[in-house]
Amino acid sequence: MSVPKTEAVIRDYNGRPTVFVNGQPQPLPGFNASSRPGIYERASEFFYAHKMGVYIIQPRVERFWQGADIHLDPLPSQLSGGWDVEEQAEAVLAGDPDAYLMVRFTPHPPVSWKEAFPQELFITEDGTTVGSSASMASTLFWDTMARASAAIIAWIEKQPWADRVIGYTNFQVTEGTHIPVDRGYLFDHNPQMVAQWRRFLQARYASQDDLRAAHDDPTVTFESVDVPRDRLRGAMPEVTDILYWQSAVGNQPLRDYLELQRDLWHRNFRQVSAAMDEVLERKVIILHDALKLTQQGWNLGAFFDLDPSWSPAYPEVMAGSGHMNVTELFNIPGCDGLMTPLDYQARGIGGVCQTEGIADSLVLRGGYYYGEMDQRTSPVGDGEFGTPRTYDEFAAVSWRNFADAWSRGYNSYWFDIGGGYYDTPEFHQIIGRQVEVIKQSIDWQHETMPGIAMILDDSSVLETNGAGNYMSDAVMWEQKLGLARCGVPYRVYLLEDLALDQFPDHRVFYFPNLFKVDERRLEILRERVFRDGHVVVWGPGSGISNGTDLSVDSVQDLTGFEMRMVEANSPRRVAITNYDHPAVAGLPPGIVYGGSMSYGPLLFPQDGDELGLAWTKWACNEMGLAIKSLGRGAGHPAGADDRRGPGDWASVFSVAAQLPADLWRSLARYAGAHVYCEENEVIMADSSVVALHSVKSGSKHLSLPGQYHVRDLVRDRDVVPDCDGIDFELHGPETAVFQLQAVEK
């Protein structure tokens, strides 16, 4: 009798998406090393001793893809001594025979393909190419990528070690972003893109007159309309000086082009995913390194390459790469989840752990998120990306990163991308303990605590000038500077998640980029958000567009506030002025928040209760932070007869972004959320875990939302058998991580 092949699927287990291998849940602590000869085997020796759940191995795509040809049997490795995927698999299974494997490949075109097909490349308005990037409209490129992906999987499935392979990862080049946009070029003038553009517009507009009206061009025709010219490169005064939020007049070509990129990306992503899925004769998981957080408008290329040529305004990279409405892709065949790095910008000591991928949204939908922890370390690091400089710093950062994963329901793995990052016995004392906890935690019950929900609209760029500055500087940093340090757990979801039956209870809802208002959106907000005493916080520009015009009427429809609009750019700051209101009572004096980035138009609340004054170029005693009770307002009274219901909520509008931690904590308490910590420390929590990360030594206190048995996971010891709070000493930098077991009443 033949032995059944190994199969792997994603199922819910104890409240989190979990990989089941042959029907059994697997914790899958993971390791990935650079596949350069000598590095993988040396680095892996340390990890073999921990009995990791999965090792990630990497074939070279150029062995399968040369010019126009896809080789079903790979070409010989050109590496000295070999050491391609075959050698990696054999070495791993020799070192850890019980290990599972995940195959990760990057199906970007080899030089031979680019040289053979220059007509398939992205072309700027000047007629030049950007590196050797293929056009998003190139059907040849995407067809070949799909065939190459399928060929790699088909060959690996025939190998003697294939039964240890439980998944495949398509590692998109530049981590899912389109390289030209990553380099500051948004508009592709390849003839194939021009043809796609014209077909797209002909399908969108009923007549030529409609096209002319929408594009504000009385001479344009379906046959002559050209791709817009790039205004997001160079000094760009026309971008930095124009308003960030824009009506459709004069902006419709940009909107149309971004939606075309979305449609092309969705088509291409579906094609590659389907090709990977169809070639498999058994069930395994398929992950993708793509679909980054919508607020990751930061310029990846400039960030990594330190390119001084980048201007003050750059394209919103993810939207320009077509990554809008991504929830449509979460449940298609060939997409079981995502594998992306942890955010680079604040990963050092004192910083926060964030996933680049849409982890909370994916986990909510039952998808698997595998976070890549490529933390540089002092033995080989050069100080980049918050490299820990000492053993204590490594411990603090490492425990913080894993606490974030445990508390948010995703998994993470170590990635020795440079070689030698973890080749230190002292580091492996920490890693070994973390592997133990990962294996234990699979049996813990995980529930999201009612805290703060940050809700993102991943199509919001359509209402803007297309620059990524606001999303990067105002929205992305909101989490790092305020939400992560307010003492209340928060999660980041996409707007579409609100309609899901399984959307968890939260007390505060934050909408940093809900710029467009329509009845469909209002209906779901009334059903899920505008009720039960919730506090709803609106970022600048909320509701400013009805999809066609900028209007204070649409702002009022969304937020409940009467508004005044000033069509000008300005830096924005807000000073708290009314400390008597219960929503901000107890805050320390002198709170001023905001930033120096200039954007507009400005919206000023005209009614409600003043909490703070706006400090802008165009405000004179204008409210900058206001709260307004709708129905019976916010709060969570103890009396059952007085609990809030539908239509009972409080609306909070802020002229400036990046609310400070103290303010978030006060608003959350006003809404009835539990506050774990009163200091501005980094807090992570769910029903089974609470953690605190700090660089400051001293006595710390964590308040718990009930009675718990508490166990110190770092030191592997019980702390308190039955308590509603934890008191402990911290020697900064340090991360304390505690397991919580609810006491039966």
Image (cartoon, grey):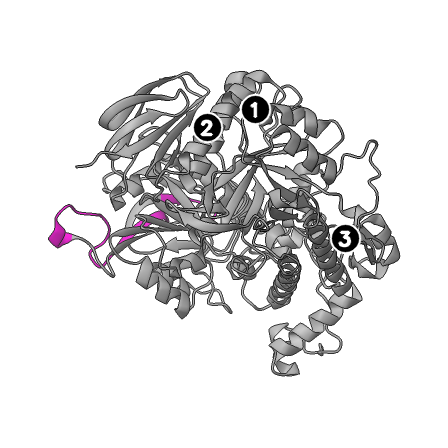
Q: Disc 3 to disc 2, how far (Cα)?
A: 43 Å
- The residue pinned by badge 1 equals 49
Tags 1 and 3 in contact by the CB under 8 Å rule?
no
Image disc number at residue 436: 2
User: Is residue 423 something that shows in the picture?
Assistant: yes
Residue depth check, mark 1 versus mark 2: number of the one nearer the observer? 1
Q: Which of marks 1 and 2 is nearer the N terminus?
A: 1
Which residue is at the front of the view, 236 or 319? 319
In the picture provided, is 536 more to the left or to the right than 160? left
Left or right of 237? Residue 744 is: left
Select label 1 or label 3 by which is in front: 1
The amino acid marked with disc number 3 is Ser
Give me the C-alpha separation between circle 1 and circle 3: 42 Å
Q: Position of residue 71 (x, y in %)?
A: 81, 54
Other residues around mark 1 within 10 Å, as few (<14) / some (14–19) / many (≥20): few
Displayed quadrant of residue 441: top left
Are the residues at dot 1 and dot 2 in contact (C-beta closer than 8 Å)?
no
**Amino acid type, callout 2:** Glu
